[in-house]
Every structure is written in structure tokens, then in C-alpha cells.
Amino acid sequence: MRLAALGLAALLLAGPVSATPPNVILKAAYAEPTTRYDHGVLGDAVEWGALVLTVDTCDGCAERQVRRFTIRLPENRVFEDIAPRIIHDEFAMTYAMVVESDLALGARLAIYTAAGLSAATPFIGQRNRWLAPVGAGDLDGDGIPEIAYVEKPHLSRELKVWRFSEAGLEHVASLGGLSNHRIGEDYISGGIRDCGDGPEMVTADAGWQNVMATRLVAGRLVTRAIGAFIGKGSFAAAMGCVE
């Protein structure tokens, strides 16, 4: 069984416009393991039925007022993921970014607060179709953060970038021929790095021959090979800006 991490690095993310900031998420973890979805893309048939958020319900108070909130999915959905990712926007709002899968419609990337679902991409549309998050950040330097994932990293292998807007998540750009996960691995490779000249999304190419760095430039994704893929260490080196 995969264990969900409790404390994850914060990432910059712009959230939907809200008159009342959500409570501050301190920790996020998956709970209530379930075998109701037998995809097994992450190496076993166990997924998660609930998301547990540990929240400071009085941000700015002299003492923290901590509560735990449990968000349970309906019986036709699971969290098909390694661990939830705590992300922050420029207003100090916090969210949990997760991979949520429907038993008939496949995966989507979803954003939760303690109050429930905040925003989500569309479901892929078919059972046993998954996506692997890359990360979140201001990818093009315009002050508006984006989120990124690879849709169907074992099939179509398409990097997708979305941006928050008042209407929810808005699709920005897509590029095929990239992957960040292989079937059965209990981890997702790569991520977002900044080696001093702006953020880049680090993945493999479709054939897992090279490590790739991709930028969002004027609404388009531009990619380049930065080294041969020779194992997990190749990604560690790339994320550490060693090429």
C-alpha cells in the first residue's frame, strides 16, 4: 500500500476569486484505502476514498485553532494518487491538489479546500485513463500561476497546462511526446525547476530515452532535451540543475 505524505512543499498557485479566504491547510493526507477501482497504475490495486485536511481555522490569531476535515468521495470515485500536494496562492489561500478518478470516466486534476471542491479539470472520459501531476507555479512570468500535468503518461503522453480564471480552470497549452510516469512505479518523475532563468517542467520524452525541459512561452510549450535518461538519478540531477 502506498503511504500518503503529510507535509509537502508549498507551490505558488492562483485560486478562484473568493470574498472569503478559505482556512489555511497545514497538512493533507489520503485515508480510507479502497479496492473499488482496480486500475493499479501505481503498482497495486489500493486507492483512497477520503482526503483528510488539517486546517488552521483562525489564520492570524495569536494561537492556532487546528481542526481536521475529512472529504469523502462517492462510491464511484477514488483518489488515484501518491500524495496530495499543498499549494498556496498570492493571497495566502491554501489548497490541496489531487488526482481524482471516476470509475467510468477516468482521472481529473482537482483542487480542494476544507469546504470541498474548488476547481477541477474535466475527467479524461474513459475508465482506466490517468494523469500524473507535474506541479504548479507561474510558468510564463506573467504573475498568474499555472498548474501542469501529463495526461495519459503511458498512452498519448500529453503535457497539459491550465490556469485559474474567474470561471475556474482555463486550458492554456498542450504538447505531446512527453511522460513522467511508467506503469507500476509508485512515484512520479520530474517536476518544476528554476535554474536561474525561469521555470521549466522536467519530464521524460515519450520513449524514455531523454530527460526533457519544457517552458511555457507566449502561450505555447517549447521543449528541449537536457540529457539522456539512465535511471531515477537522471531526474534528480535535472531537478538539481545538473546537466
Image (cartoon, grey):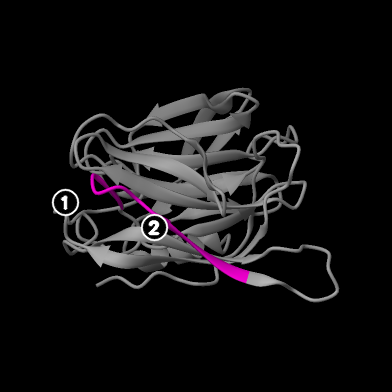
Badge 2 crowding class, 10 Å Cα cut-off, few under 14, some 14 to 19, many 20 or more, is many
How far across and how far down the image is residue 70, in percent? 46, 61
Is residue 226 visible in the rendered image? The answer is no
Q: Which mark is residue 39?
A: 1
Residue toward you, 114 or 187:
114
How far across and how far down the image is residue 106, in percent? 25, 38
Residue toward you, 16 or 181:
16
Identify the image quadrant of residue 41.
bottom left
Amino acid at the residue labelled 2: Ser
Residue toward you, 23 or 4:
23
Q: Is residue 227 shown above or below 127?
A: below
How far across and how far down the image is residue 13, in percent? 64, 45
Residue found 53% across the figure and 60% down from its top: 239
Q: Secondary structure at mark 2?
A: loop
Identify the image quadrant of residue 123.
top left
Residue found 77% across the figure and 62% down from its top: 59
Q: Is residue 161 shown above or below 243?
A: above
User: Is residue 242 rendered to the left or right of residue 49?
Assistant: right
Q: Which residue is mark 2?
A: 189
How far across and how far down the image is residue 236, in percent? 47, 66
